[in-house]
Image (cartoon, helix red, strand yellow):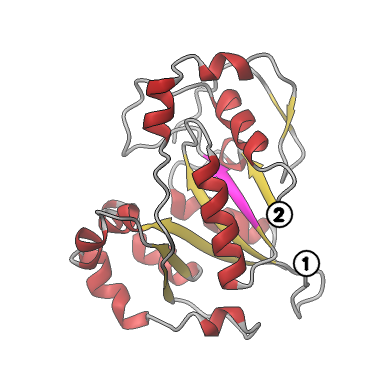
Amino acid sequence: MGMTNRANGRRIGLLGGSFNPAHGGHRRISLFAREALGLDEIWWLVSPGNPLKPKEGMAPLAARLSSAMEQARRAPIRATAIERELGTRYTVDTLGAIKRRYPKHDFLWLMGSDNLAQFHRWRDWRGIARMMPIAVIARPGYDGAAIASPAMAWLRHFRVPLASFANGGEWSSPALVTLRFDPDPRSATAIRRADPDWASRHAGKTLRDQVTHRPIPSREETTAP
């Protein structure tokens, strides 16, 4: 993998989610985004909880992180529960803390068009956009809502061509780039329905965070999302 022109710095895409569980669709979309955007690696931010998703049916953090590590094997992807360690509640605070902790790296926020459709409901979403570039990955059935969303009405003024990311130039923000690729039919909801006991297979494992290298306890965490 090529290094950036910053000393010891890397270009890293951040993909947040519950990963309940992580699956091949997450891996495929991440590898596609890495290649398209010229990134060094992708970090999966496995959330302790998502305030916009119901808690019912949410597996313990350790099980979700374990499933993410399994899917990230032999790929330039690192699964992390860094939000738990940072104690941050909102994405804008998490991303700010990550930038402060890793000042040599360049970060980019990856999100699906389904998230863009509700991005205006996130705490200080404009602050997120000013903090780092955003790459939106088109997802079938959500594009119309994403294009019509309040966030897109603001972000469209900052659209940039994909080549501006991939050629190794300097990044600035706000910046929005849209990626399109073949849809993947896999979803965590369908996997849970077909395999309701998936989390039990990840129970009791000794985990070490792939970014912070801190151990992750196997018991359920109660940290606020």
Viewer-side residue, 190 vs 150: 190
Residue type indicated by callout 2: Pro
Q: Which residue is mark 2?
A: 76
Q: Horizontally, is 203 left or right of 210 in the view?
A: left
Residue under the point 20% across and 65% down: 150
**Which portion, as a residue range, is magenta?**
42-46
Question: Is residue 40 depicted above or below 190 in this figure?
Answer: below
Residue under the point 63% across and 15% down: 203
Q: Secondary structure at mark 1?
A: loop
Q: Horizontally, is 112 left or right of 141 in the view?
A: right
Q: Residues within 10 Å of mark 2 (few under 14, many from 20)?
A: some
Residue under the point 50% across and 29% down: 223
Viewer-side residue, 53 vs 138: 138
Expressed as whole percent of the image width and height from the top left, the position of residue 59 reads 48, 22
Q: How far apart, in angstroms, are the residues tagged by discs 1 and 2?
A: 9 Å
Q: Residues within 10 Å of mark 1 (few under 14, many from 20)?
A: few
Quadrant the C terminus occupies: top left
Residue 125 shown in magenta: no
Residue under the point 75% across and 22% down: 206
**Residue 36 visible to an observer of this rendering:** yes
Residue type indicated by callout 1: Met
* Circle nearer the N terminus (1, 2): 1
Viewer-side residue, 48 vs 92: 48
Indicate the quadrant where residue 119 lies: bottom left
Expressed as whole percent of the image width and height from the top left, the position of residue 189 reads 37, 31
Report if the CB atoms under discs 1 and 2 are less than 8 Å apart.
Answer: yes
Indicate the quadrant where residue 181 lies: bottom left
Quadrant the N terminus occupies: bottom right
Label placed on residue 1: 1
Q: Horizontally, is 146 left or right of 160 in the view?
A: left
